Image (tube, rainbow, N blue to C red):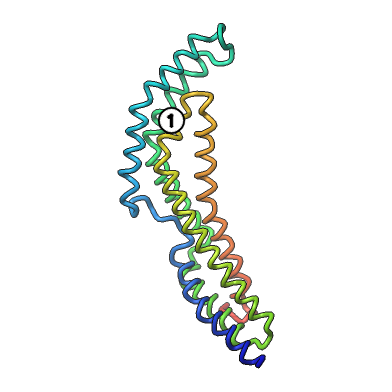
């Protein structure tokens, strides 16, 4: 009975590890370039059109703040408002280019972390072979359950990838509206939030690449049953 249960768990681990790690090696360690997402451009253009339509209102509000300086308020003068109005519109206009270059940079950094000697697809395939061999060769239920935990972790990473790509697309589409908020001090927090969130989303793949490198060094190092 125990042998049958172990064989059943080993079969689950064997069937799940290879496709999950293959997906990890081919897609999860990068963000799709914006040119591969043709719908992003038109949606970004729609947001940019809203910025152009509403930027006069931001300029008007900025002018009111300047005129109210030393009367209604004393914090914001023309020296604080004018640079914001001059920076916000170009930032919104260039947001698609900025986002595209940031994605390409993140992909390049991920590849740099992996190194030229590590092919993600080949490395994850070798890692899958090692884990499957350990699962099949082990009669200890604990190690088989550990293999299932690895499978569950990989599923979680896959879900994270999907969420990360969706959030990246949303942030790119909303970039003109968010970055136009640099124009006014009261709205500047929205623009700063966009920069922080976009950077954090792209940094996730860097952390995943580093994790893969550690896993490869640990499981595929000489003496661990993997390839040297």
Measured as percent of width and height from the top left, residue 57 is found at: 39, 21
Q: Measured along the vertical axis of the image, is residue 1 above or below residue 47?
A: below
Quadrant, the N terminus:
bottom right
Q: Measured along the vertical axis of the image, is residue 162 above or below residue 90?
A: below
Measured as percent of width and height from the top left, residue 12 is found at: 54, 81
Q: Residue at 44% across / 27% down in the picture?
A: 87
Disc 1 element: helix
Task: Answer with left or right where residue 77 lies relative to residue 56.
Answer: right
Q: Residue at 53% across / 43% down in the picture?
A: 197
Q: How many marks?
A: 1
Task: Answer with left or right where residue 224 lies relative to residue 97.
Answer: right
The outermost residue toward the top is 71
Residue at the spot of label 1: 180
Q: Measured along the vertical axis of the image, is residue 153 above or below residue 193?
A: below
Residue 53 quadrant: top left
Q: Residue at 41% across / 48% down in the picture?
A: 169
The outermost residue toward the front is 1
Q: Measured along the vertical axis of the image, is residue 29 above or below residue 223?
A: above
Measured as percent of width and height from the top left, residue 5 is found at: 62, 88
Measured as percent of width and height from the top left, residue 106 is found at: 48, 51
Label 1 Cα crowd, 10 Å radius (few <14 / some 14-19 / many 20+): many
Question: In the depicted view, which residue is nearer to us: 114 or 14?
Answer: 14
Task: Answer with left or right where residue 14 lies relative to residue 85.
Answer: right
Quadrant, the C terminus:
bottom right
């Amino acid at each position: 009975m125990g042998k049958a249960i172990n064989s059943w768990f080993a079969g689950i681990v064997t069937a799940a590890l290879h496709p999950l790690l293959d997906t990890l090696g081919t897609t999860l360690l990068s963000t799709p370039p914006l040119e591969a997402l043709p719908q992003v451009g038109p949606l970004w253009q729609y947001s940019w059109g809203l910025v152009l339509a509403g930027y006069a209102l931001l300029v008007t509000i900025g002018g009111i703040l300047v005129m109210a300086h030393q009367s209604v308020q004393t914090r914001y003068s023309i020296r604080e408002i004018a640079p914001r109005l001059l920076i916000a519109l170009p930032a919104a206009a260039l947001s698609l280019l900025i986002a595209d270059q940031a994605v390409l940079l993140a992909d390049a950094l991920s590849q740099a972390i992996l190194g030229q000697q590590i092919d993600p697809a080949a490395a994850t395939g070798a890692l899958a072979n090692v884990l499957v061999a350990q699962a099949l060769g082990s009669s200890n239920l604990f190690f088989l359950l550990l293999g299932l935990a690895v499978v569950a972790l990989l599923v979680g990473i896959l879900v994270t990838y999907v969420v990360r790509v969706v959030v990246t697309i949303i942030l790119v589409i909303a970039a003109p509206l968010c970055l136009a908020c640099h124009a006014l001090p009261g709205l500047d927090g929205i623009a700063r939030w966009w920069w922080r969130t976009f950077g954090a989303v792209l940094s996730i793949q860097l952390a995943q690449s580093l994790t893969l490198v550690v896993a490869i060094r640990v499981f595929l190092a000489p003496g661990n049953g993997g390839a040297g």
